[in-house]
Image: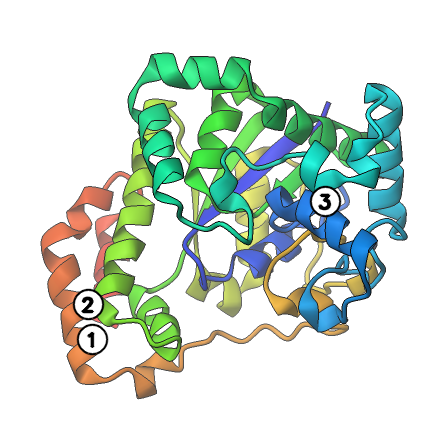
Amino acid sequence: MGKLVYILSFGHSGSTLLDLTLGTHPQMLSTGELMFLPFNLQRSLTAEYPISDGSRCSCHLKYLDCPVWSETIERIVLKTGDISIRDNPLRGFDMSFLRDQDFFASGKLADRIRKWLILAVPEVSTRCIQNSFSLKNNWDVIDTLAECSGKKYIVDSSKDVFRLFHFLRYRPQDIKVVVNIRSPFGVVNSYRKQGRSAESAVKQWLRYYRSAVRLCRQFDIDPFLVNYGSLCEDPIAVRRAVLQYLNVADDGMDELVINRGGHHMALGNGMRFQDEIRIRADDAWKTVLPPADKKITVNYLKKRIDTLSSLISTKQKNALLSQ
Ligand SMILES: [Zn+2]
């Protein structure tokens, strides 16, 4: 059976880089945002898409031509006898826990209410898990990937807190949680480029990590915290520290080399298609983030960031706010 390394991270915060970094270890397999696998399998069946469209595996092959995914899918079809996994994955092979993880239906109100109910009312969540084919499908993929690749740890950077909640209710002993965090100013700047306000970005940033804290507390998990800035500065040191947390023997890698042919991500940042990944911290916000947006961010967090104190040390908190 496979072990799951689940990355919790707000968007635009370097989770793909962290996933790829961990995937360089011989015992770990990067899978990117695994919950989108059925969606991309479907796309690879229906038409040709350019690589930039993201519908191919990060090894540049179509999913069903990729040696890792094709073998995994075939083995699951054999185990379950369900050919829809291969022939009509979007209909027959759900790996998301609610429809709002479908590309086409983000944030439907009814799903948001269901999600809230499931998280807030234990009886609802128990029933939901008992009836969940998605959960079985996810573990089938994780266990089969481990079998096919010979790797023990499957890294999933789907980031979704709700998804982790489901995993934890079912096989908590097989899950390790790594929380990746980037300076909120960097996040605000990324959102600003998409035309979104500083206030909404910082609100969402805080809300995300608060739910991560709540979930870890609920399941008595002490997650490992990765700072995006440290990851860019010294990826080998961060990699070593995560390995130690996972209790995985260090393979002695002293220079990070991410080989494109060596990973097979379902989805993630476009960097997964690059032949050569150069790690450079995106700290453009230091020069381009307008002072007014910086002020909004600081003022919002000053009063509220203590709610993350079980996740972020005082030193880290001060570092995040003083930049
Ligand atoms: Zn591949």
Label 1 with label 2: CB-CB less than 8 Å: yes
Asked if residue 184 shows in the view, the reply is: yes
**Residue at mark 2:** 297
Between the residue at mark 1 and the residue at mark 2, the CA separation in whole angstroms equals 5 Å
Between the residue at mark 3 and the residue at mark 1, the CA separation in whole angstroms equals 38 Å
- Kind of residue at disc 2: Thr
**Residue at mark 3:** 29
- Kind of residue at disc 1: Lys
Q: Quadrant of the C terminus?
A: bottom left
Q: From the viewer's perspective, tell me whether residue 264 is left or right of residue 217.
A: right
Relative to 185, residue 104 above or below: above
**Label 1: few (<14), some (14–19) or many (≥20) C-alpha neighbours in 10 Å:** many
Helix, strand or loop for disc 2: helix
Please state the quadrant of the image where ligand 1 appears: bottom right
Q: Earlier in the sequence, mark 2 or mark 3?
A: 3
- Kind of residue at disc 3: Leu
Q: From the viewer's perspective, tell me whether residue 194 is left or right of residue 120.
A: right
Helix, strand or loop for disc 3: strand
Q: Which is nearer the eye, 218 or 101?
A: 101
Q: Which is nearer the eye, 124 or 291?
A: 124
Q: From the viewer's perspective, tell me whether residue 47 is left or right of residue 109.
A: right
Residue 158 percent coordinates (x, y): 55, 46
**Label 3: few (<14), some (14–19) or many (≥20) C-alpha neighbours in 10 Å:** many
**Residue at mark 1:** 294
Residue 128 percent coordinates (x, y): 47, 19
Q: Residue at x 56, y 48 (%)?
A: 157
Q: Which mark is residue 282?
A: none
Asked if residue 150 shows in the view, the reply is: no
Q: Quadrant of the N terminus?
A: top right
